[in-house]
Amino acid sequence: MAYLERASPALKETLLKIYRAEKPIEVDQHFHEFGSIQYHIKYSVSDPSIVHVSTSTLLETQGAVTLKEISSQTYEVIKNIAVGVIDIVDPPRLGFQLTIGIHLDNIPRGKEAIKIITKISEIQAIILSNQLKEMLRHLNFQDDSRPINNNNNNNRPIKIVYHPSEPFYVFKQMKKITAVFPMNFKDNSDVVIATSFFQEMGKAPQCSWSPIPPLQLRGEPVQDLTTNSGFVSFDITSRHVEGKRLDKTVWNLLNFYAYVKYHIKCSRGYIQRRMRKRMDSLVKLLNNTNLEEEAAQNENGRCKYVKEFVKVPKGKMMMKQRCKEMTRRVKISKFRIKINGCARLRFNQRWISFPKFSSKPSNKSYTKLD
């Protein structure tokens, strides 16, 4: 499994920690990356001038080219990373493909040291790239009638497995080499996004997508050809392997799975952000509608309450007005009251004054009427 960054982050961090330590520290670290690449770092206080790094990957291939073995050209490329700093240990550590010794005393100080350590951290990427480069170089030196490998079966594709769950196939055709990637995803949402992405990408030249495997893959194991997102094919011609283009072509092929996964994750994140944003806008709209309805109900309730409070029956209203009028007349009365009926008793008519009532105390006494 190749990755977007050529340098291993864990290997680079560990080597920088050893290099920058004021005092030698004991390190015996074994770790994996992407499930198929493993590293072992050994640094002893008894020999503080050298660090041993071992690496390997789980590789399986079909054909004459065996990727489990590192070629002599790859060894030369690794030695030329930093001349005088790296030595190849033979034989390698048990269970690993390659073991190198890094001489810390020969690493220059300053920014140059970080560059060298970064290049050393790219050792696994160099191994994978050079193995695939050797296969693609045959395109310029072989006739169209000859296969990409030395196998007698010209139509037999080569299966390359850099990761147990992500193999791809390479086979020779007329004036080109075709790389086929079977695509599988666990989540249904990833399948939908990836399929739409492949359908659009298949419209590009020298790239195609098909829900069924190519005819050249007939006879391959069924479990390798069982996919839920189809097959993506790339055609590699002679111009793709000329000069510096070869490194770019190889790196793009090795990172295709990583590129697809990165694209799917970005697409899922974008879709989820849009959905959350849309949901927030709908929630705000619903909340505003509820507030408007409550305000309208409150206004209608207040008007109704006022109307009911003011509304009084006519009979009661008239009685109330008469009482008020009577009380007003009695309070403001300053005229004499004429009493009729005294003639029966053979009394002369008399005029009497209505007493004044006041809340203030008064020294005057009431006048007794006869």
Image (tube, rainbow, N blue to C red):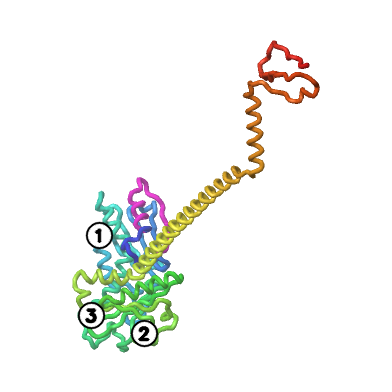
Which x, y percent locates residue 13?
A: 36, 55
Q: Within 10 angstroms of label 2, few (less than 14), some, or many (20 or more) residues?
A: some
The residue pinned by badge 3 equals 139
| Cα distance in 3D space between marks 2 and 1 | 42 Å
What SS does tag 1 mark? Answer: loop
Q: Quadrant of the N terminus?
A: bottom left
Task: Name the residue nearer the viewer: 67 or 220.
Answer: 220
| Cα distance in 3D space between marks 3 and 1 | 30 Å
Of the residues under marks 2 and 1, which one precedes in the sequence?
1
Could one spot residue 45 in this view of the protein?
A: yes
Q: Which residues are magenta?
A: 11-33
Q: Amino acid at mark 2?
A: Leu
Q: Residue at x 25, y 49 (%)?
A: 110
Task: Tally the marks.
Answer: 3
Q: Within 10 angstroms of label 1, few (less than 14), some, or many (20 or more) residues?
A: some
Q: Quadrant of the C terminus?
A: top right
* Quadrant housing residue 329: top right
The numbered mark at residue 134 is none
Q: Residue at x 54, y 49 (%)?
A: 300
Q: Nearer the viewer, mark 3 or mark 1?
A: 3
Of the residues under marks 2 and 3, which one precedes in the sequence?
3
Q: Nearer the viewer, mark 2 or mark 3?
A: 2
The numbered mark at residue 82 is 1
Q: Amino acid at mark 3?
A: Leu
